[in-house]
Image: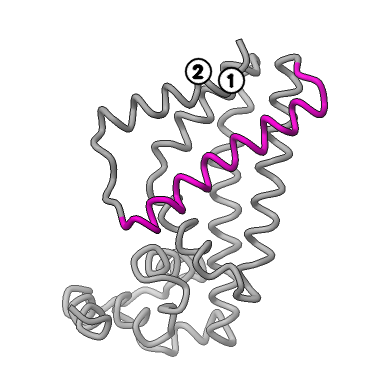
Amino acid sequence: MTSSALDEAASAAAPERTGRLSADDWAQAALDLIAEQGVAAVAVEPLARRLGVTKGSFYWHFPSRDALLQSALERWEHVEQEAVFGALERVPDPRERLAALFQMVAHEYQSHVIYSALLKAQDHPAVQPVIERVSKRRLDYLTASFRQTGLGREDAQHRARLTYAAYVGFLQLNLQLQQARMPQEEFEAYVEHLTKTLVPV
């Protein structure tokens, strides 16, 4: 089915809304579209059809498509940061925190799909700074956590890079090989192996 046909199907399924949509509603709809079809698919008319509203609702909140894209990326960045790092602040032991991080990240499928779509568009002027900020924040968090396990500064940095490279590499490998999701049992075994390999004892 073509992108146009998908949009038409979504439009037919979406009821006409009577309440005014918020900027967050539009940003989340843009993120959903990024996850399904990539950054280039974000456009006002298809999103309006999906949401069951006119384009006027969009221009109430955003001056342009680029402004919507920027808002969507900022929303993804903020929600991901709060959902992952915020939840882990309650885990005092750094080894348990790292293991919990691996489990949490491994099972946040939607975030992976969005991140994979952003990797494919990382030369986009709106996407590039977001990828850079997110990557730096993740590496800094991992380095600090590994330092707290007792590793020296250099060893902690190396372990953080290795951990993050394993994450990004796994996503890129799936993209290159066009693989479907691994069978659940196999995937859980992989995450357990990754945790035992990377988290210091």
Expressed as whole percent of the image width and height from the top left, the position of residue 197 reads 53, 21
Above or below, 97 against 56 in this view is above
Q: Residue lying furthest top in this view?
A: 201
Q: In the depicted view, which residue is nearer to us: 191 or 3?
A: 191
Amino acid type of the residue tagged 1 in the rendering: Val
Q: Which mark is residue 199?
A: 1
Q: Quadrant of residue 26?
A: bottom left
Expressed as whole percent of the image width and height from the top left, the position of residue 108 reads 41, 42
Q: Is residue 188 left or right of residue 142?
A: left
Quick one: quadrant of the N terminus?
Answer: bottom left
Instruction: Report the residue at 34% width, 83% height from top.
Output: 46
Q: Residue lying furthest front in this view?
A: 177
Expressed as whole percent of the image width and height from the top left, the position of residue 135 reads 66, 50
Q: Quadrant of residue 148?
A: top right
Q: Is residue 82 left or right of residue 175?
A: right
Above or below, 142 against 146 in this view is below
Q: CA distance from mark 1 to mark 2?
A: 6 Å
Report the magenta stretch's main SS.
helix
Q: Which residues are magenta?
A: 151-178
Magenta segment: does it hold 99? no
Instruction: Report the residue at 45% width, 45% height from top.
Output: 170
Instruction: Report the residue at 45% width, 63% height from top.
Output: 117
Disc 1 and disc 2 in contact, CB within 8 angstroms: yes
